[in-house]
Each structure stands twice: as structure tokens, then as C-alpha cells.
């Protein structure tokens, strides 16, 4: 790839460099796959929206234990792995349109919480459909999510100009109102080199809305990875570090 492509990748990574805020990170969900680090800023969140249910519901159970209603969506399963009175499940994939099999994030939130304007939490793991789903989500709704946790897939495709453009635009859309506070590479699938930059194929990103950082606080870039609460997604595989270019 060209020098221009390397500059584009590095510019995107620079915008995503994690920042430490006054909110310490806590872990919701189990050690290993299905657990994520989020800022300890959960008070008064009305609901968690969690598209992509999978085989574990530890993150959602911890949200419910914190008094947060949980809305879950996944066409590939018949329901969540655990049960709770706080859980509300719809058997649809979250995507770019609403029909029998899929629903947009905007329509899902509107149907689930009609008339609500309260802060929300988003935890998304939808196996590669996240870039399109987030790009088709309105700025107004994204701004309601105080915390956004997304597992981004197929990042090796940054080598494709069209995919890189879409990824950069999607990250830019999130970063209009949020800052990145944590990145955890998923060690399931390794890393690749794209335009001279090492990129994990899959990584979990945590974002915090900018207005949750006190004006007098001076956020500092995170210098040390992994975080003490991080855990390998696949314990039997080797640790996958966040590449140095992501901290440059």
C-alpha cells in the first residue's frame, strides 16, 4: 500500500488513542470472552442495549445487577444464555434496515423506550456488521449513549481503500461526541500488517461521552497496556498486545 494509505491509517489510530479520565475502568462480565472494561460511570443509566447475544450473558447480568434494564437482540439465538427480569430480548439482528429479520438501532431504541431521552449504554458484538450498523445510526441516538463498547471485526480489511474509508468515517462519527478510553485486542485471531502498521484483526473499544469528563480534568493518554483488569478472550492462546503504533 502507498505512503498515503499509511498516513490514513495512522491518522485514524491517532484519533483513537485511549485517554485516561477521572472515571476508573471496571470490568463487567466474566474474565475472558464476553467481559468488557467500562468507565465507572453507571449511575442513572436507564438501559443497556446489547446487540449480539452469543453464548454468555455475564456483561448483561452485571448491568442488571447494577439496576440497569437490558435490551438484547440477536437473530441467531432464541434467547440470552441467562435469565433475568431485567432482560428484554428480540430475535432480530441489528442492521441498516428494519424488517422481519433485522432492526436498526434507532428503531430498536424507539420501540423499546418510547419517549425516553435518558442516558443509555451500548455494548455491540455483531460479528462484522458493526461498521454499517453504526454508520446508519443517527447522531442524535449515538449521543444518548453515555458509554459505547464495540467489538470491531475484520480490521485487517483496512488494507482495502473502500473499507478503510468506511471504518474511518464510522470511528469519526463516534468521536464527534465520545473519546476512546480503552482498547483490548482480541487474541483469538492475531494481527496483520496494513500499510506498515500492525493491526489486530479484532479488538474491543470502549468510548465515553465527552461531557462526562469534568472540564477541569486534564485527560492523559494511557501509556500502559494491558489494563490490570484485561483478560485474554481465549485463555489457551497467547497474549496479543496492543501494537506500539496505536500508542504513538
Image (cartoon, rainbow, N blue to C red):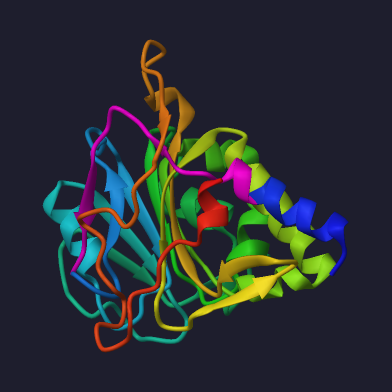
Q: In terms of depth relative to the viewer, which is nearer, 24 or 100?
A: 24
Q: How many marks?
A: 0
Q: Is residue 5 left or right of residue 112?
A: right
Say above or below: 209 vs 204.
above
Q: Position of residue 247 (x, y in %)?
A: 51, 48
Residue 99 seen by the camera: no
> Which quadrant does the C terminus fall into?
top right
Residue in the picture at 61% in, 56% down: 134
Q: For residue 65, what is the image quadrant?
A: bottom left
Q: Position of residue 205 (x, y in %)?
A: 45, 55
Q: Is residue 20 magenta?
A: yes
Q: Position of residue 70 (x, y in %)?
A: 29, 57
Residue in the picture at 65% in, 73% down: 193
Residue in the picture at 32% in, 86% down: 237
Say above or below: 9 vs 72.
above
Q: Is residue 234 left or right of residue 10?
A: left
Q: Is residue 168 magenta?
A: no
> Which quadrant does the N terminus fall into?
bottom right
Q: Which residues are magenta?
A: 13-30
Q: For residue 139, what is the image quadrant?
A: top right
Q: In terms of depth relative to the viewer, which is nearer, 98 or 20?
A: 20
Amino acid at each position: 500500500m502507498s505512503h498515503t494509505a499509511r498516513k490514513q491509517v495512522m491518522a485514524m489510530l491517532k484519533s483513537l488513542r485511549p485517554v485516561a479520565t477521572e472515571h476508573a475502568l471496571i470490568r463487567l462480565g466474566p474474565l475472558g470472552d464476553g467481559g468488557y472494561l467500562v468507565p465507572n460511570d453507571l449511575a442513572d443509566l436507564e438501559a443497556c442495549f446489547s446487540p449480539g447475544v452469543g453464548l454468555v450473558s455475564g456483561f448483561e447480568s452485571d448491568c442488571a445487577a447494577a439496576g440497569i434494564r437490558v435490551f438484547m437482540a440477536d437473530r441467531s439465538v432464541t434467547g440470552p444464555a441467562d435469565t433475568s427480569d431485567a432482560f428484554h430480548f428480540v430475535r432480530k439482528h441489528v442492521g441498516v434496515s428494519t424488517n422481519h429479520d433485522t432492526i436498526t438501532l434507532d428503531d430498536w431504541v424507539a420501540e423499546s423506550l418510547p419517549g425516553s431521552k435518558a442516558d443509555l449504554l451500548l455494548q455491540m458484538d455483531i460479528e462484522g456488521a458493526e461498521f454499517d450498523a453504526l454508520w446508519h445510526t443517527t447522531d442524535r441516538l449515538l449521543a444518548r449513549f453515555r458509554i459505547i463498547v464495540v467489538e470491531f471485526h475484520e480490521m485487517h480489511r483496512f488494507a482495502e481503500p473502500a473499507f478503510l474509508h468506511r471504518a474511518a468515517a464510522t470511528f469519526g462519527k463516534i468521536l464527534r461526541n465520545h473519546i476512546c478510553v480503552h482498547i483490548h485486542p482480541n487474541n483469538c485471531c492475531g494481527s496483520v500488517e496494513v500499510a506498515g502498521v500492525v493491526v489486530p484483526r479484532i479488538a474491543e473499544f470502549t468510548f465515553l461521552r465527552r461531557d462526562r469528563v469534568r472540564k477541569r480534568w486534564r485527560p492523559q493518554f494511557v501509556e500502559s497496556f494491558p489494563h490490570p483488569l484485561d483478560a485474554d478472550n481465549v485463555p489457551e492462546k497467547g497474549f496479543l498486545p496492543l501494537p506500539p503504533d496505536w500508542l504513538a
